[in-house]
Image (tube, rainbow, N blue to C red):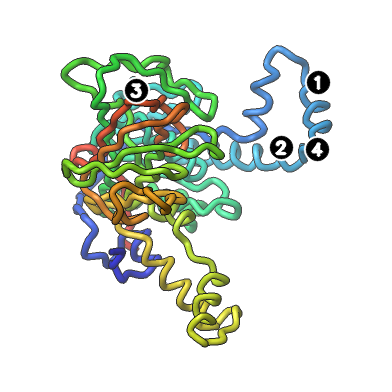
Amino acid sequence: MFGHKLSLKDIILGINNVFTRHISTKSLKIDKVLVVSKLSRYEYEKRKYKDENVTKFLDDLKRRGADIEKLVYHYDLHKKYEERIVKTLKSRGLDVKVVDRYNYTEEDVNNCDVIIPIGGDGTFLLAASLVNNNQKPVIGFNSDPNRSEGYLCLPKKYSTNIHAAVDKLQAGSFTWLLRNRIRTTMLTSDECLNPTFLHDSELGLNTVKLSEGDKRLPFLALNEVFIGETLSARVSHLRMRLNGSTENTNLKCSGICVSTGTGSTSWHLSINRQPVQNVAELLRLVDIDPTEGKDSLATVLADIYNKNLIFPPDDKKMAYTIRELISAAVWPDPKGIKNRGFAYKLELRSNCYDAALVMDGGISFPFNDGATALLEIKPEDALRTVIFKD
């Protein structure tokens, strides 16, 4: 079921990957650059005290046990790095505009040639959230590679070699990677939905009005879509159809996570990862007494299994995982559904009390009893990113 036998590096970077869609290019027009700045924890906390004096802000942080020096240090680190990138871009004669989570708009996206998020994967996801076609390039720089993996950003070595990265972009020394995203279409008749932005940002949008002819939600999920009760202790009751089937499967679970290839290195991997301890216990059940050390059989098998949960970012299928599926008595109904697998189309109907449909862990829509959504991947919805040739 999860059969791509590829190394972790090849899958994440899309290198030497026969499944990955590489499109050559001669150059990249980057006359107008939109820089999307990371919102640091320090800035986020300080924003809550915009009408208060600095002393009260710092006193409250101390009272909560926050490490103020650490917060300020990482804030300064990011801002200095951002200044370096902006200075480098302007030195090339480029028009640069800097925005953050609170003033980033679709107009900004439409008026630039390329979007450069500076931060980590969270900032990259924010930047991608307002790009609704496969033409606008999004190219991320990791501002703190010592603390952030930055899977979606350029390789870490370019965090300290900004000029080399810009040279490659301007010279066309890269290939395109079109990362597929999940389109969500509401199949129920409600005309208005109120999105909740989980990172305290509104992105200029308070209510989503769905026309009768087009009920697509105006955001595309780069990593995953999660559907389930907002209170994690409450059982999620959902009905699911796979790949256009007319057969419903009734489920009780802790929610369903539907992931892209890009998202397969993220929440999807965390949900399905097998720890060495579990593999060792299975081996003992068949009278193999493995250790759990670095080079043990259990460690090797766990590593192989976990790496093969990952699939290419431009794969046309989605991976679904039913979290903590209740498999007892009459559930699921009918029997036979696998708790994880691949699908090209996935239809979900809610029988929940207080549920949500959440995109990329940042944008949430109500998804209560009767709500029905169709999840699918369309090539025109892909996100345009780059891979350097070195």
Q: Amino acid at mark 4?
A: Gly
Q: Position of residue 139 (x, y in %)?
A: 37, 43
Looking at the rendered structure, the number of numbered marks drawn on it comes to: 4
Q: Position of residue 262 (x, y in %)?
A: 35, 50
- N-terminal of the two: label 2 or label 3? 2
Left/right placement of residue 62 relative to residue 294 reads right
Q: Which residue is mark 3?
A: 106
CA–CA distance in space, label 3 to label 1: 36 Å
Q: Which residue is mark 2?
A: 72
Q: Are marks 4 and 3 in contact (CB under 8 Å)?
A: no
CA–CA distance in space, label 4 to label 1: 14 Å
Q: Amino acid at mark 2?
A: Val
Considering the numbered disc 1 on the image, is that residue within a helix, a strand or a loop? helix
Specify the farthest residue to the front. 329
Q: Amino acid at mark 3?
A: Glu
Left/right placement of residue 185 relative to residue 118 reads left
Considering the numbered disc 4 on the image, is that residue within a helix, a strand or a loop? loop
- N-terminal of the two: label 4 or label 2? 4
Q: Which residue is mark 4?
A: 65
Q: Are marks 4 and 1 in contact (CB under 8 Å)?
A: no
Quadrant where the C terminus is found in the figure: bottom left
Q: Which residue is mark 1?
A: 56
From this view, report whether residue 248 is shown above or below residue 369: below
- Does residue 222 appear in this view? yes
Please give the name of the residue rendered at 42% of the width and 73% of the height, measured from the top-left corner. 304
- Does residue 223 appear in this view? no
Please give the name of the residue rendered at 80% of the width and 37% of the height, measured from the top-left corner. 65
